[in-house]
Image (cartoon, helix red, strand yellow):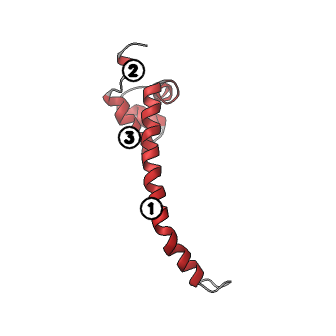
Amino acid sequence: MTKQDKTLQPEHEQAIALILAGETDQAIADAVGVTRQTVNGWRNHHPEFIAELNQRRAVIWEGHTERLRGMAAGALDTLEARPLGRCEK
């Protein structure tokens, strides 16, 4: 592996953003100007790419977790106040 392989290039950064946005490998490949197989290779065999993707996913999930924690008390209060067996229409 060369020094260039060990750093994230702009197309890697763009690909990671698109993965996190839910795009397919083919859509990502088209956007960054590489083949679908290249994107697949980054996802599965490029340690720095994988590490950065996982780190960004962790940040997103942490934000979701904090949001859920903040919503939990109010959601439980709402559920507790509702009579059992009745749905609002």
Tag 1 residue: 67
Q: Which mark is residue 32?
A: none
Tag 2 residue: 6
Q: Position of residue 8 (x, y in %)?
A: 36, 27
Among numbered discs 1 and 3, the one appearing first in the sequence: 3
Q: Position of residue 74 (x, y in %)?
A: 49, 75
Vertical placement of residue 8 versus 63, above or below = above
The type of residue carrying mark 1 is Arg
Q: Position of residue 10 (x, y in %)?
A: 31, 30
**Pointer 3 and pointer 2: residues touching (CB < 8 Å)?**
no
Say which element carries label 1.
helix
What is the distance, in whole Å, between disc 2 and disc 1 at their CAs? 35 Å
Say which element carries label 2.
helix
Among numbered discs 3 and 2, the one appearing first in the sequence: 2
Q: Name the outermost residue toward the right.
A: 85
Can you say which quadrant of the picture contains the N terminus? top left
Q: How many marks?
A: 3
Q: Residue at x 52, y 73 (%)?
A: 75
The type of residue carrying mark 2 is Lys
Tag 3 residue: 17
Vertical placement of residue 31 versus 81, above or below = above
The type of residue carrying mark 3 is Ala
Q: Position of residue 32 (x, y in %)?
A: 36, 31
What is the distance, in whole Å, between disc 1 and disc 3 at their CAs? 22 Å
Rendered image quadrant of residue 9: top left
Front residue of this view, candidates 73 and 44: 73
Q: Within 10 angstroms of label 1, few (less than 14), some, or many (20 or more) residues? A: few
